Image (cartoon, rainbow, N blue to C red):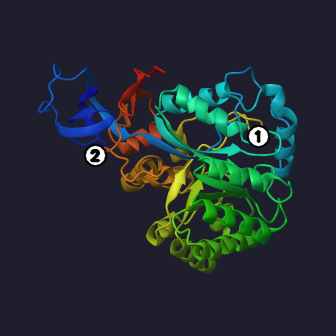
Amino acid sequence: MTSLLLADVRPWGGDAVDVTIIDGLISDLSPAGNSTDSSTETEQRIDGRGLLALPGFVNAHAHVDKSWWGQPWVSYGGQPTTQGRIAHERAERDKYGIPSVDGAKAVLREFLRHGTTATRTHVDVDLGVELRGIANVLEAAAALGGAIDVEIVAFPQDGVLRRPGVLDLLDKAAAEGATSIGGLDPATIDRDPVGQLDALFEIAARRGVGIDLHLHDHGDLGAFQYELIAERTVQAGLQGKVNVSHGFALGELAPARQSEMVDQLGEAGISWTTVAPATSAPLPFREMRAAGVPIGLGTDGIRDLWSPYGDGDLLQIARGFARLHGLRTDEDLTYAVELATTYGASFVHRENHGLTVGARADIVLLDAENAPDVLVRAPRREYVIAGGQVVVRDGELQV
C-alpha cells in the first residue's frame, strides 16, 4: 500500500481540507487538521499551505504524435488550407522524425507540467506510418509510469476513402485497442460524405469502438454532415460514443436551425470538442448543455507542422473559450474551468473525475483565490498529483 497526505488544501477555493490518497485513489477528505491518517502513518506528506485544489485537467482533443517539441525551431510552411497543411506535413515529417516516442513523450510531459492528467489524442494512421504512431504514443505514455492516462483515436489525417488501405488500418487499430476511430471532413476531403460515414460506422459498430470526427466545413455543408452523423449514430446504436471535433458550422447557423440541430445532437447522444479558436463563431453552449451535449476542451496540435503555437496548457484553452463566449460572471468563469476538468471525464471514459472519495487521485494545486481567479491568471501549477504520484513539485517536473 502506498499513501500520500495532502494537508491544508482548498478544493475549488472552498474550506481547507486534508486529502488522503491510498494506492492512487482519494480515500478520505477531512477538515484540515482532522485527517484520520496522521503524517506519521503516511509514506509522504505535502503541506498544501492553503493552495487551491482542482481535479486534473482533461485534454479532450490532442495530437501528441505530431510535435517537434524539444527540437530546434521549425519555421511554418505549407499552404493555409486543410489540404495544404496535410500535404506539407506528409512531405516534411520524416525530416523531423515525426512520429517518434521521444516526441510524444515530450508533449505528454508538458501536459503534466500544466496539470493535464488524462487526454484523448488523435494519432495519425495512414499508408506511410500505418500503426507506428499509435505504438509510439503508447510507449511514451508507459515510459511516464502511468502518470497520464492516454486514450487513442486512430485518425486518418490524409483521408479515408481516397487512400485505399486506410479503412483496413482503422479496422486493425480498432481491433488492437484504439478507443475510437476518426474521420475527416467527409464532404471536402473524401468528397463522399455518405461513403466515408457509412464505412466508419460499420467498423465502429462491429468493433465496439467510438467515432471522433474532425469537421472543419462551415455553414450548410457542415450542418448537412452533422445531420448524416446524427442519423447514423441512432441507426447504429452508438449513442454516447460519437464525437464531433471542431464543428465550426454549428456556431454559424441561423438561430432556428441551430436550435433544431442542437436538439438533434442531444437526442443522438453526440458530444463536442473544441479548441475555441479566436476566429471561430461562439458555440451555443448553454443550449448544448441543456440538451445534454457534452463539451470538451482540447489543445489540438502542439508545435507541429500545422502550426508553431501551443504549450500544452489546457487552462489557456479554457480562458480562450471564456473570452470567445464573452464569459464574465463567477459562475460562467467557473464553468469554463469545469469544462477543462470535471466535465472532461466522459471523454476519457471516467465515471468519477473530481475531488471526491474513490476518484483517481489527479489533483492540481495552484496559488489562487478561487476558480475564476485561476482562469483569468492561469498561475503556475505548484503541485500536480497524477494517480497518487507527485509529478510536479514547486512548479518543476519530477518525471
Q: Amino acid at mark 2?
A: Thr
| Residue to which mark 2 is pinned | 356
In front: 136, or 376? Answer: 136
The quadrant the N terminus occupies is top left
Q: Residue 253, percent across and down?
A: 66, 72
Q: Which mark is residue 306?
A: 1
Which residue is nearer to you in this view: 113 or 333? 113
Identify residue type, mark 1: Trp
Please say if 299 is above or below 386: below
State the image coordinates of residue 70 (x, y, percent, origin top left). Answer: 67, 22
Q: Dot 2, crowdedness within 10 Å: few (<14), some or many (≥20)? A: some
Quarter where residue 283 is shown: bottom right
Instruction: List x then y, in percent, for residue 55.
Output: 38, 41
Q: Residue at x 16, y 19 (%)?
A: 40
Above or below: residue 118 compared with residue 102: below
Asked if one can make out residue 245 in the rendered structure from this viewpoint, the answer is no
